[in-house]
Amino acid sequence: MELNQELVFKLVLSVVVGGAIGIERELRSKSAGFRTLMLICLGATLFTIFSQYIGGAGNPDRIASNVVTGIGFLGAGIIFRDNNRVTGITTAASIWLSAALGVGIGCGCYWASALGCILVITILLVFSIFDNFLDRLSQVKEYKITYPYDITQIHRFERMFHEFGLSVKSAAKSKSGDMITGAWVVKGKEHNHHKFIEHILKDKEITNFSF
């Protein structure tokens, strides 16, 4: 394998494409950022180039086909559950797509890879505004409230959630002495959550409130 202009172009383009996607992730302080996505895209390009020489004319895809499997393990490492929400999926998808673009560059599909890069950046930047809008319409929060035990008010907060237009997804309560501690996972509009929080903060009977 000789070092020629086409090979250099592929490697440089993979770094540029991976870096362009990585900048957006870096600006959002995600776990896989600028350097990570550049390395992933470059690595996928190199695997594809090497497979063309190792596999030969009859089976050139035997290494490149395993890039998808390897990237799957890498992407799974940044997905985790936090506060009843699964986070890291978008970054994992960015890793997966960066590898796909690297494979495309390695096999010479330059225009398709360039267009794919533009579409990925557009989705990450433009559609995040739409995603934030949807999040405000349907926001999930976990509330923990500690209050004096009173049998007549055991379902008090369930009724209160309903009054503020919030729906309870799950609930758990525990009693210690004369105090009850309840934990609720609640879904609803953002402004409804704000109204509920403002109301609870004014309640003198509540001894502990976290959200």
Image (tube, helix red, strand yellow):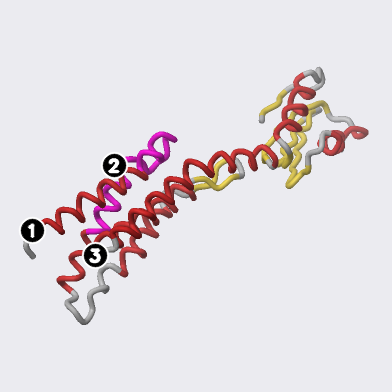
Of mark 2 and mark 3, the one earlier in the sequence is: 2
- Magenta-colored span: 22-45
How far apart are the two marked residues, 2 and 3, measured between alpha carbons? 20 Å
Disc ID at residue 35:
2
Name the foreground residue: 73 vs 133.
Answer: 133
Dots 2, 3 in contact, CB < 8 A: no
The image shows residue 143 at horizontal and vertical percentages of: 70, 34
In the image, is 116 to the left or to the right of 132?
left
In the image, is 71 to the left or to the right of 133?
left
Disc ID at residue 3:
1
In the image, is 150 to the left or to the right of 123?
right
How far apart are the two marked residues, 1 and 3, measured between alpha carbons? 16 Å
Disc ID at residue 48:
3
The image shows residue 128 at horizontal and vertical percentages of: 53, 41
* Above or below, comparing residue 149 to residue 34 in the picture: above
Secondary structure beneath label 3: helix
How far apart are the two marked residues, 2 and 1, measured between alpha carbons? 24 Å
Majority SS type along the magenta span:
helix
